[in-house]
Image (spheres, rainbow, N blue to C red):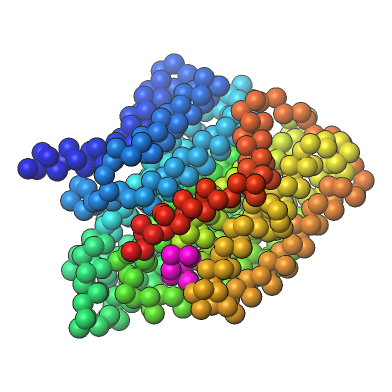
Amino acid sequence: MLDILVNAGIVAIKPEIFLLFSTVVLLLYGLYRQPRASTQLIVLALVAILFTGFLVTCRSIPEGTYLGGMFESSQFTVFVKTLILTAGGLVLMLASGYLREDGGRPFEFIILMLFAIIGMMLMVSAADLLALYMALEMSSLALYVLASFSRDHAKSSEAGLKYFVLGALASGMMLFGMSLVYGFAGSTSFSAISELFAGQHYVLSKGVVVGLILIVVGFCFKLSAVPFHMWTPDVYEGAPTPVTAFFATAPKIAALALFMRFLLEPFSQAISQWQQVIVFVSIVSMLVGALGAINQTNIKRLLAYSSIGHIGFMLMGLAAANNNGVQAILIYMVVYVFMSVGMFGSVLLMKRGGESFDGIKDLSGLSQTNPLLAIIFSICLFSMAGIPPMSGFFGKFYVVLAAIEGGFTWLAVLGVCISVISCYYYLKIVKTIYFDDPEPAFDKARSWLVNSAIAIGATVTMLFFLVPTPLVTLAKAVAASLIK
């Protein structure tokens, strides 16, 4: 019987096992044959990601819990894992140019990205507090190293150190919160905790509430939500641009998906305890994101504050705590991935003589020196501002609708007002691109992988409005599988 359960569990996590095996093979290959990153190694990693995505979506894994209730398989986990793999693959394509510079950078960059993706996939499937923490740390350890990958640059080393120290603090708080929940609930299993709290005569103790709040704090750090956002601008600015693109997409998708499952599954009965916290975090994140970006002169720092604002908007859907809220967040996550890839890919092309630039003033007159790049920048900026018909508008539209249907009309109105404020700094960049005197032209992009990733991101962002129905329908079905 035990063998049957173990075999079923292995089948349930076979995408993660395959990607882990592929990562180890690539590690050995790079160690003995290819110490520097090459197009060949990048393509092999992309093939591994692509086949892992096939294993995730082939529907050969029945829904349920596996490995003693440690992991779960459902429509929700399949959807989010697919999105994580998509984001990881696109960012790896963006990184191809960076990795082949200076005679080829160390191949460990690719290995670290793959290990982080494996951790994120396990995070999404976690159905136990122990599995949640172990998967979270597996992902985080790789991200700490990636943040400081450019060891010759002081800002990159500073970014990695800040992220590591603050990340360790957040992980400690989260682990302490989990120990409190375990101490009062007597179990670390999501299903067992949910059953206990669903009892008619159970009164949520103060110890459990304190533990819940500490775990929420840890998640807010991973999401860079206010007031635990202090690391974000420095890490976004200091880390290599491909790493910043990775930070802005896959880890946030994984953390937000796990956050939703954590609050809506084991703690669905404690909504009155955590809903008000999520509402507060959503409001202050939107405000800080909008106001903090106004005076920024570095585009990567501006995008860091922008990401904080976007997380605040997504948390508005979580505050609604209903099917429509989850559906809206899923739609928002998809459009956010593609517009972020297009945006950071464009920033990656800001080079002159092989030297990278990330000042907003460096975009002056871009429409005259590189009209195509100017159009891509503008598409992504309009989308992030939520201006129709770009895809970002649909993400915000569905979140606002969910908030209204959840009884938070005042929050929806506030979110729209803050979104109008954020339009200022996005349109300021568009004005710089089209109306300021031109700076010297940027170098032409020579990597077909980079150009392909940017083209995919910009095309989806611009043309999403033509066929939104498939994603909306799929997101609705996935949301229904989470909230039953």
Image quadrant assignment for residue 375: top right
At a point 55% along the width and 74% down the height, the residue shown is 404
At a point 67% along the width and 44% down the height, the residue shown is 463
- In the rendered image, the quadrant that contains the C terminus is bottom left
Of all residues, the one furthest to the top in this rendering is 33
Q: Is residue 356 above or below residue 103?
A: below
Of all residues, the one furthest to the right in this rendering is 437
Range of the magenta residues?
318-325
> Between residues 340 and 265, which one lies in front from this camera angle?
265
At a point 71% along the width and 64% down the height, the residue shown is 422
- In the rendered image, the quadrant that contains the N terminus is top left
Q: Position of residue 226 (x, y in %)?
A: 55, 67
Magenta segment includes 10: no
> Between residues 403 and 344, which one lies in front from this camera angle?
403
Magenta segment includes 319: yes
Q: Main secondary structure of the magenta part?
A: helix
**Left or right of 119 on screen, residue 7:** left
Q: Position of residue 59 (x, y in %)?
A: 33, 39
**Left or right of 260 on screen, residue 311:** right
| Res. 306 in view | yes
